[in-house]
Every structure is written in structure tokens, then in C-alpha cells.
Amino acid sequence: METEFTPLLSATGGILIGLASVLLMLTLGRVMGATGILTGLLAPASRSDFSWRAALLLGMITGPAAHLLLRGEMPEISVPVSLPLLLVGGFIVGLGVTFGSGCTSGHGVCGMARLSKRSIVATLTFMVTTAITVFVMRHVIGG
Amino acid sequence: MRYLSIYIIGLIFGLGISLSGMSNPAKVINFFDIAGTWDPSLIFVMGGALIVTFIGYRLVLPRPSGPIFEGKFALPTATKLDARLIGGSALFGVGWGIAGFCPGGALPAIGTGRIEVLAFIVAMLGGIFVARAIISARQNAQLNSNVKRA
């Protein structure tokens, strides 16, 4: 399935992701990692620890509505895989981000921006295994 | 003020993810499908986010007074490159390549109400719980063997 090349929209989105990461550091002194925020919400250290994560997640979930206001439509979501594969992929993502202590936002943006050795290694590792997985799913198994 | 600010920061992140295409599995998978229907858009997401965060952190982190609402910056302290980090990251990539959603892309997309997003998140939570159980079982085993040795 072809998707449209959107360099300007994607760069704008990236700049906003970066801005949010910087603002979270400025206000709370925290790294903007989706994995850490979600994991901490499930097992919060204290009530205030739960509250800021809940407020942040609530803001995130309002993002698509802001997109609707700005652009007149919800963000496009096309899932090119079957439901069983989506569930298997989701389960593996859950395992991976917990063992690896982070994902695209935590390691890929915040950690890389801090030049953290762990995050650079983590990001290179998952970029390579994602590319291999997509190649195998699309061109070896999928045909 | 504190929670309103944090809510707005989440909104900026969620809007950024929505505009960027990171919550669209077809686009994510195409970014990695160089041999097929390649869509290089996501390099602009990563580039934009990294440039802003790289510069922004260097302006924010030297503040002598620390963050606005807290006493000090809470940066990750681990430095070791261990098998758990590398194995976990490798596994994350496999899951991301299969499903096309990553946590940062999927969480804001809950707001679209799409059933596929919810299915992915439920499965991901399952993986998070299993991994946490394995980690704490291992830590307990380690503690027990240390106690025996002592």
C-alpha cells in the first residue's frame, strides 16, 4: 500500500514532539518517553506521580481532536496487517519496551538528544530489527 | 497551573504525533520498506524532533534552579550497555515492524477511538505485564541466591 510523502507535515509534527519533550523537561524535569509514562501510570510511585502522568496522557489523547480542528479530519490510520498480527506485534512491543526500558520517544528522541550511549545503541538496534522484520514480512513471507 | 501545563504539553505531543504520521502503521511500515513502497517521511519526524530536543535540552538543563515544578531534573541514570537493553530493543523493533504502532504513536491515537488502536494497546499492556513479571521473578531469584550465599 502506497502512502503519500509528507515531508512538511512530518517535520512540523516532529518539531512539536521535540517542543513537548523540551517543555516536559523544563516543567517537571522528566524525559518524554511514552513507555515510561505508561508504565509509571500502571504502577505509580505516589498519588502526584499518577496525576502528572494521567494529565499528560489525557493531553496526548486530545491530540487527534486538535488535528481534526486544524485540518478538518482525524489523523489517517491505515492498518495494513491482520488483527492477529496486530495483537502479536503489540504483545512483542510490550515485552521489548519493558526489557529495553524505552521506545522511539524515550530512546529515539530524548535519549539521543542527551547523547546517551544506551539510547543510541537501543535506537540503532530497534531501527535495524524493525527494517529486517518489515523486509521479512513483506518480501519473504508476504511475497 | 501544574496539571494544566502538563495537559497542554501532552496535547502538543499528541498533535505532533497526529500530524507526523507516526500513528499511521501503513506510513511507519512503508518508512522501513525501502525495497518496496518506500515513504521517507518519518526521517523528517525524527530529524525535527531531535534538532528541537537537542537544542532545547541544552538551554533547559543548565538552569541552576532546576525544572519549574520540581526540585531537580530526573534524568535516567543507567549507563551500562547490557543484554537486557539490547535484547529488549531488538524485540521492540520486531513488534514495531509487525504491527506498525509504537507506544508513542499509539497512545495519542486512542483519541481517534479506532478499535485497531485499542486492540494494539491491550496486547501491548499484556506484553508489559508479562515482562514486568519476568523481571521481578528474576530479581527475587537473585535476592534469594544472595541471601543463601550470605
Image: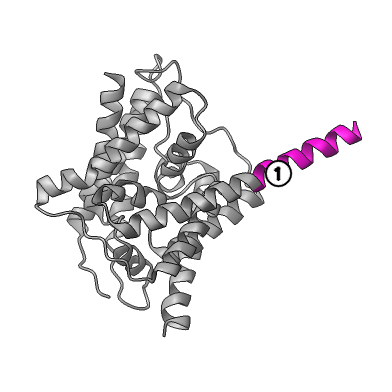
SS under mark 1: helix
Neighbor class of circle 1 (other Cα within 10 Å; few <14, some 14-19, many 20+) is few
Front residue of this view, candidates B107 and A14: B107
Front residue of this view, candidates A66 and A3: A66
Q: Residue at x 20, y 61 (%)?
A: A6
Percent of width and height locating residue B72: 45, 19
Front residue of this view, candidates B51 and A61: A61
Give the magenta part as a residue range: B134-150
Q: Residue at x 54, y 54 (%)?
A: A96
The chain letter for the residue carrying disc 1 is: B
Asked if residue B100 is positioned above or below residue A72 in the image, the reply reads: below
Residue type, mark 1 in image? Ala
Q: Is residue A117 magenta?
A: no
Asked if residue A3 is positioned above or below residue B9 in the image, the reply reads: below
Q: Is residue B79 left or right of residue A111?
A: right
Q: Main secondary structure of the magenta part?
A: helix
Q: Which residue is mark 1?
A: B137
Q: Is residue B145 magenta?
A: yes
Percent of width and height locating residue A3: 23, 69
On-image quarter of the N terminus of chain B: top left
Colouring style = one colour
Percent of width and height locating residue A75: 20, 55
Q: Is residue A38 left or right of residue B9?
A: right
